[in-house]
Image (spheres, grey):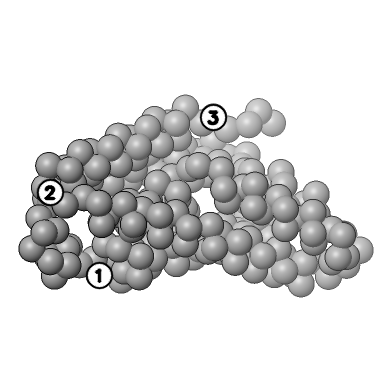
Amino acid sequence: MALETWLAFFVACWVISLSPGAGAVASMSAGMQYGFWRGYWNALGLQLGLALQIAIVAAGVGAILATSALAFSLIKWFGVAYLVFLAYKQWVALPSDLDTGAAERPIGRPLTLVLRGFLVNFSNPKAIVFMLAVLPQFINPQAPLVAQYLVMGVTMIVVDLIVMAGYTGLASRVLRLLRTPRQQRVMNRSFAALFAAAAGLLATVKRAAV
């Protein structure tokens, strides 16, 4: 991949990652609930979902998913249902009084947070369609395709890890300001509303006409 092509793709990755979405909401929610280091496991899950989406596009399966109404709908509605589930879990999350010390904070299991992030990213069929439209713009068909997809995949994942670290870290600092159960309850329900809004947006996504 030519340097100028990679630089253009690098800039595009920052624009894509910084755009608010379900992944950003999930990262902020994890940071707010568990703090930075524990909550960052969610970001690792997001990257696993992203890596699988890139692999699907590189393998050509993404074209099938993009043109199959059934496959698109199944993935979309699974994503909607999962985001609604996260909204419910966030809404009913029990606050704890942080004045009693950090030991009272909820402890999320790393594998659970990784799976949560993975499902948030992978259950969005619009991302696969989007990558099908974007990634080929930076591909040189005369050069080895696998190497180019690997370079783009690593670039996207590294950029997204940095961006999600920012979202997670910002939210984890907010955690320090939530000293009472009432304040935490308000924040939990705010994130529940964001997850519900993300589910609503995903529900409106339609497969591109072919």
The amino acid on which the numbered mark 1 sits, given as a three-letter code, is Arg
Nearer the observer, disc 1 or disc 2?
A: 2
204 on left or right of 103: right
Sort mark 1 into few (<14), some (14-19) or many (20+) by Cα contacts within 10 Å: few
Return the residue nearer the eye: 163 or 78: 163
Looking at the image, residue 103 lies above or below residue 135 = below
Please tell me which of labels 2 and 3 falls first in the chain.
Answer: 2
Please tell me which of labels 1 and 3 falls first in the chain.
Answer: 1
Label 3 SS: loop
Mark 1–mark 3 Cα distance, whole angstroms, equals 35 Å
Return the residue nearer the eye: 147 or 94: 94
Q: Which residue is drawn at 20% across and 38% down?
A: 186
Q: CB under 8 Å between callouts 1 and 2?
A: no
Label 2 SS: loop
Mark 2–mark 3 Cα distance, whole angstroms, equals 42 Å
- The image shows residue 85 at horizontal and vertical percentages of 26, 44
Q: On residue 180, which mark appears?
A: 2
- The image shows residue 53 at horizontal and vertical percentages of 57, 57
Please tell me which of labels 1 and 2 falls first in the chain.
Answer: 1
State the residue position of label 3: 206
Q: On residue 100, which mark appears?
A: none
182 on left or right of 210: left
Sort mark 3 into few (<14), some (14-19) or many (20+) by Cα contacts within 10 Å: few
Q: CB under 8 Å between callouts 2 and 3?
A: no
Mark 1–mark 2 Cα distance, whole angstroms, equals 24 Å
Q: Which residue is drawn at 64% across and 68% down?
A: 154
37 on left or right of 34: right
Label 1 SS: loop
State the residue position of label 1: 109
- The image shows residue 139 at horizontal and vertical percentages of 82, 57
The amino acid on which the numbered mark 2 sits, given as a three-letter code, is Thr
